[in-house]
Image (tube, coloured by chain):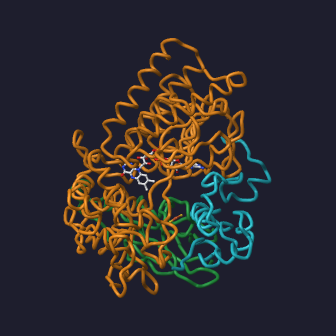
Amino acid sequence: MRMDVAIIGSGPAGINAAITLAKKQKSVVVIDEQGKVGGKLIGQLHEDPKDGWWIGKQIAEQMKREAEQVGVIFLLQREVWAIEPGWSIKMSGHEDITASYVIVATGAQENPTPVPGWTLPGTLAIGAAQVLNNYERVRPGKRIAIIGVDPLAFTVAQELKLAGADIVGIYLPPEGLFATEKAKPQSTIGYLSTMAHLAPNPWLRLAGSMAKHHFIQKMGSRFYPKAGMKVFGVPLRLRHSIISIEGTDQVEAITTVKLSSEGKAVKNSEESIVVDAVCISGGLVPLVELASSCKTVYIEELGGYVPLHSPEMKTSKKNLYVCGNITGVEGAKVAMEQGKLAALSIVYKMTGDEQLREEVRSQKEEVNRIRAEATITFMPEIMSGRKKMEQMWNEYVHESRDTHDIR
Amino acid sequence: MDCVICRCEEVLLSDIVRAIEDGYTSHREIKLKTRAGMGICQGRTCRLLLDQVIASVSQGPVPKTIGIAPNVPIRPIMLGDLAKGGGKAK
Amino acid sequence: MRIEQHPILGPLNNETVTFTFNGDVYEGRKGESIAAALLANEIRTLRYTAQKNEPRGIYCGIGHCYECRVMIGTKRSVRACITEVVEGMKIQSQGG
Ligand SMILES: Cc1cc2nc3c(=O)[nH]c(=O)nc-3n(C[C@H](O)[C@H](O)[C@H](O)COP(=O)(O)OP(=O)(O)OC[C@H]3O[C@@H](n4cnc5c(N)ncnc54)[C@H](O)[C@@H]3O)c2cc1C
Ligand code: FES
């Protein structure tokens, strides 16, 4: 079949792009390797100070219904393994489809943090814990330890507590080559305090403002209480790291070690704590593999390598657009607005209609407005990351003015 | 601290470090020598880790390929898909 | 481990399905993944590895890592985390 637009990824970005395109009478197909529509949205559950509870599962179901009503076709449980200019989309199961335009909305993935014993059953990536707990409604464990101090760890800690789990603490990862800065008390305290002002997640705000407390800041981490501080009842263990996970057939305990203020393990300070599950949060990185034929740039503030793209979501490849977390790690609401923007940009490109130019312009403003108000932020310097991308795009357009169609 | 890096092929951090010390320094060479990243998930979990080990042991910068080095196809598709080059969806 | 009551999400759907894992009969909830159904029955170890015979279970939860692979009938390498459990399903641990 030949479509106007093929979208890879049915997360909040892809699905909103699809709805917008279908409403403009374009034929559109959304492909996802999962059997469910919604991407990372399905496991999300947090309280928004303005809009109340954000229940990802329900929002995903609503969006799916709306998409089907306006004629979006879903091809689920199909992994896209290549896209070729033209565009031909290669899927598992001997299938392919062609489309004039393609939107890659493959989201972000977790950055793994290896810990000795992390292959033991009961050790989960934090995203798996989120989906099991909030979507499947099965608690990953009764007594849970969390490794990694970041916004997602706080969010999921709160979600696990809501479901009645006992969380023994949020700990630093072991010192070593995989988590150099993230394993140090001092840099973690610094990171938390930079997040405090922009963290509407009440947990993060509290942790951030505690970290900001003048004497902890001034003295670095030396006076950070060794016992940890409690954030809404969960011990935040910035002076302890988990050095291994123990068990025979599944997780039975963690071994922790005390850290000096410089982040060095204190001799003979090992302690064993009984748990039945461990969640590891190593941070998020954009999943760019399918867009790797585009020009890609490294912008740390966005989460790493991302496809170079215009403020209208166009990439360096003809008729290939991106939206959502593949362009930088942010919350679901921003991804939704980026999806609409990518769709409007494509419709404008197809029709050249002046009315659409205006719609694209106002949607760009909407993305910025939602970003500024975001209640969940993963990258503290996201705004400057976005500015860098715009500059890089402008330079790219300038350099390649004669060879590319850059409308 | 030793631990599993490639879960699929059961490759330890120490296996990778030894390979690098033996002179297998590129992502590709290490993969072929240790089988790290050659298992059923096609390196989706350990690719980022492998790059970090290389950078750390060789004391160089994290390779520019980080996260964007997947070969086409990007997924462990059935060989049949590749042979047929795809077919038309309904 | 099932979250029957939830302060925000309310009560849980209680339609059940019956399935087997390595020959033993278990109950799951309609619509849930194989991984969730097994975890709800306190089963975390889904298989042992080929070389070192180490236990493995669900890790990424979104179909990327293949750690949760099981056999359904004669079909190998089915990912328990993204496959729905259905009435009468026969699930087996997969070596390797
Ligand atoms: C573990 C985790 C937890 C998160 N928790 C929160 C949270 O609590 N709150 C919040 O606001 N944000 C959270 N985020 C950020 C999240 O990425 C955004 O909220 C939002 O879901 C991004 O939307 P998206 O559409 O860009 O991508 P996603 O929602 O990630 O959707 C991408 C989709 O693309 C599909 N896909 C990828 N590659 C392929 C392929 N090759 N073939 C076929 N399909 C493919 C995936 O299956 C997925 O369904 C989390 C992210 C992660 C990784
Ligand atoms: S747990 Fe990773 S694929 Fe199922």
> Is residue C8 placed above or below A237 in the rendered structure?
above
A221 or A157: nearer the viewer: A221
Rendered location of residue B36, percent (x, y): 66, 70
Instruction: Find residue A372 and report its horizontal and vertical position in percent.
Output: 33, 35
Image-quadrant location for residue B52:
bottom right
Residue A66, percent from left and from top: 41, 34
**Left/right of residue A55 with respect to residue B21 in the rendered view:** left
Q: Residue furthest top?
A: A354
| Chain displayed in cyan | B
Screen quadrant of the C terminus of chain A: top right
Q: Is residue A400 left or right of residue A224?
A: right
- Does residue A156 lie above or below A28 as drawn? below
Residue, far front? A218
| Residue C86 on image: x %, y % | 47, 63
The color chain C is rendered in:
green
Q: Is residue C79 above or below residue A95?
A: below
Residue at the extreme right: B83
Total number of numbered labels?
0
Image position of A12 (left or right of B60)? left
- Identified at 50% across, 16% down, the residue is A357
- Colour in which the image shows chain A: orange
Compared to residue A374, the image places residue A161 above or below, namely below
